[in-house]
Image: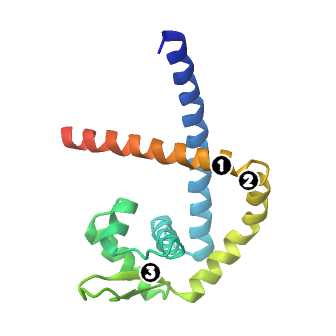
Amino acid sequence: MEESALEGVAARRELLVEALRVYGGHYAELSRSFAAHLGLYSTDATALLEIIAAEERGAPISPARLSKRILLSSGATTSLLNRLEDAGHIVRSREHSDRRVVTLRSSPHIQERADEFFRPLAAPMDAVIGRYPPELLDRFRDLLGEMCVAMDTHLTQVNQDA
């Protein structure tokens, strides 16, 4: 690639990364508001959203995987899960053939509370998404996936060098 083309790619990268940073800030604020809505610490609400999202994908999450997703030690994750379980927000079960594997599931009442909080956001988000052709949205999703792989690769390298 010639230098001017590289400069154009770098400029587009900077604009896209800035837009994603702003989106991430809005998503974090939404998570904090959800936590306040439930009367939870924001980390607890983040964990709860991860548990719900995993269920919605049809792949319930384990405590170890949750720990990696929310960047907490296993001990801190255990304390967090104890709080969520004591509050009746989650259930730990042993559904796997290997009975040592614990699966995390949200309780029905917390699903209702999450729906109550997020449902009003669905229509405006659908209106925005509906303005774009499905093929473009698919390509954007692919772009985000590839950017995540690039960041994960970089983080792995940085952590190996540390």
Sequence-wise, the earlier of marks 3 and 1 is 3
Image quadrant where residue 61 sits: bottom left
User: 29 or 22: which is nearer to us?
Assistant: 22
Residue 159 in sight from this viewpoint: yes
Residue at image mark 1 = 137
The residue shown at (35%, 59%) is 71
Q: Position of residue 137 (x, y in %)?
A: 65, 49
Tell me which amino acid carries mark 3: Leu
Tell me which amino acid carries mark 2: Ile
Quick one: label 1, few (<14), some, or many (20+) residues within 10 Å?
Answer: few
CB under 8 Å between callouts 1 and 2?
Answer: yes
Looking at the image, residue 13 sits to the left or right of residue 102; the answer is right
Tell me which amino acid carries mark 1: Leu
Residue at image mark 3 = 84
Taking 145 as reference, is 122 above or below it? below
Residue at image mark 2 = 129
Q: Position of residue 88 (x, y in %)?
A: 49, 88
